Image (tube, rainbow, N blue to C red):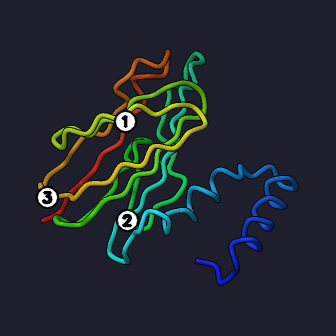
Amino acid sequence: MLNARPGELLGVMLLLGILFGIPLAVFLARDTAATWNASDGDAVIVLSGRNVGTLGQSGSWIVEYANIPIHKDEGVPIFHVRRGQRVLFRVTAQDVTHGFAISGYGIDAMVHAGAYENISFVADKAGEFTIECSVFCGLGHHGMVAKLVVEA
């Protein structure tokens, strides 16, 4: 992270947000991982859900920040973590209420527009797990998917 006092960092983020149109929420979400008591070995992922809902486009989970390996397969983000690793998701919605569910882990949280939901768990099962919006959110709902790969 940056070596700056919190007040200086907030000032820089605000200036960037005003001057360049960069959403301040992205920076705040990324830098607040420390407030969750994240350890060096934790996987930290900040997501933003958006249901575009226009013809020819679908919704998506937008990766705002991740300190772990990720890649995309046909636009679907795939997160790779180790078995036994603590995973911290910080999730928000840009537009409407979404659900954030991870199959196989019993996680299903409501994510409201403009608010962050912190989801923390230990990835204790190896395999591939679907992350999806569990609340019908509009025409782009079917595109709100990602994948969590827990490697043994």
Between circles 2 and 1, the one closer to the viewer is 1
Q: Amino acid at mark 2?
A: Pro
The alpha-carbon separation of the residues under discs 3 and 1 comes to 19 Å
- Look at mark 1 in the image and give the residue it sits on: 100
User: Residue at horizontal 47%, vertical 19%?
Assistant: 137
Task: Return the residue nearer the eye: 147 or 96.
Answer: 96
Tag 1 or tag 3, which sits nearer the N-term? Answer: 1
- Look at mark 2 in the image and give the residue it sits on: 69
Tag 3 or tag 2, which sits nearer the N-term? Answer: 2
Q: Amino acid at mark 3?
A: Asp
User: Residue at horizontal 60%, vertical 18%?
Assistant: 54
Residue 133 in the image, given as x and y percentages of width and height: 38, 30
Q: Residue furthest right?
A: 19
Q: Amino acid at mark 1?
A: Phe
Residue 39 in the image, given as x and y percentages of width and height: 36, 74
Residue 146 in the image, given as x and y percentages of width and height: 35, 42
Residue 60 in the image, given as x and y percentages of width and height: 48, 35
Query: CB under 8 Å between callouts 2 and 1?
Result: no
Any mark on residue 124, and which?
3
The residue tagged with tag 3: helix, strand or loop? loop
Tag 1 or tag 2, which sits nearer the N-term? Answer: 2
The residue tagged with tag 1: helix, strand or loop? strand
The alpha-carbon separation of the residues under discs 2 and 3 comes to 18 Å
